[in-house]
Amino acid sequence: MKIGLIDVDSHNFPNIPLMKISAYHKKRGDTVEWYSPLLGGHYDIVYMTKVFSFTPDYEYFVNSDVVIKGGSGYAIEIVNGREIYRKEKDPQLPQEIEHIYPDYSLYPKLTKDTAFGFLTRGCPRRCGFCHVAAKEGAKSYKVAELSEFWIGQKNICLCDPNLLACPDWHELLQQLIDSKALVNINQGIDIRIMTAEKAEMFKKLRVSTVHFAWDRYEDKKIIIPKFKEFKEITGWKARKTSVYVLTNFNTTIEQDLERIYTL
């Protein structure tokens, strides 16, 4: 079979589902390539994915017997001024594809000596600006071992929404520590559930920077002491920590600036 892939968002960040789909079809002996409307000719199946709802859809004719679309970008709709996640429009990967080692050759420049993946999915927070709970469930749960997408690369990029909320956080952090790879958790760590034990584990990670999240201004009485405790335990300076601050949602400019300059 001839398989075409379309990364609708762009090629600026590796699309993990497409890498897994590619690995699956190549394992079956199929031909897999980026879809080319001018030179590719006819395809048996074309997979199209996008993460962001604001990304315009692919606007050209797709010459294929079957076109399969997926990703949050196709499942988010605006209803009465609010974003709604339509799960039925976001088909999930079959388990045999979900747990296959990704085809990193699709993005050779972006994945050079770097592994990308999820150890956990889901989040218990149910934040109004986030679709993770609707898409993946309102709890954090383990979905993979590190070895499913890492085989010794020097760098690991994790996309987990709330790793520390997973009951298996200790085991998963230990896998990252044992890898001795440079770890980048690219989502904001939930400092509200940080404990001394978790901070001690983080201290053992090889990281350039750890990203935390301060989305709710009203949580400052919880968050500020947690940051102080984390700093005391790890001894990390400002250069090794950063904080994502959600703005223009339900706070004033003054409250946004307070969060920024407090930290």
Image (spheres, grey):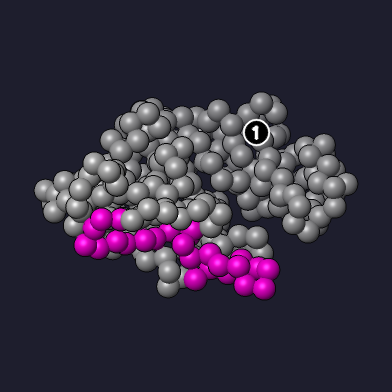
Screen quadrant of the C terminus: top right
**Residue in the image at 81% along x and 46% along y:** 256
Q: What span is in magenta?
A: 62-86
Task: Give the percent coordinates (x, y) of residue 250.
Answer: 78, 59
User: Residue drawn at (50%, 53%), measured in percent from left and top?
Assistant: 56
138 lies above or below 171: below
Horizontal side of residue 146 vs 97, given as left or right: right
Residue visible at 11% across and 48% down? 29
Q: Secondary structure at mark 1?
A: strand
Left or right: where does residue 121 sit relative to residue 151? right
The kind of residue tagged 1 is Thr
Task: From the image, tell me which residue sits under label 1.
Answer: 241
The residue under the point 46% across, 47% down is 9
Residue 49 left/right relative to 213: left
Q: Is residue 6 visible?
A: yes
- Horizontal side of residue 181 vs 134, given as left or right: left
Q: Total of numbered circles in the picture? A: 1
Residue 145 in sight here: no
Where in the figure is residue 253, as x and y percent of width and height? 85, 47
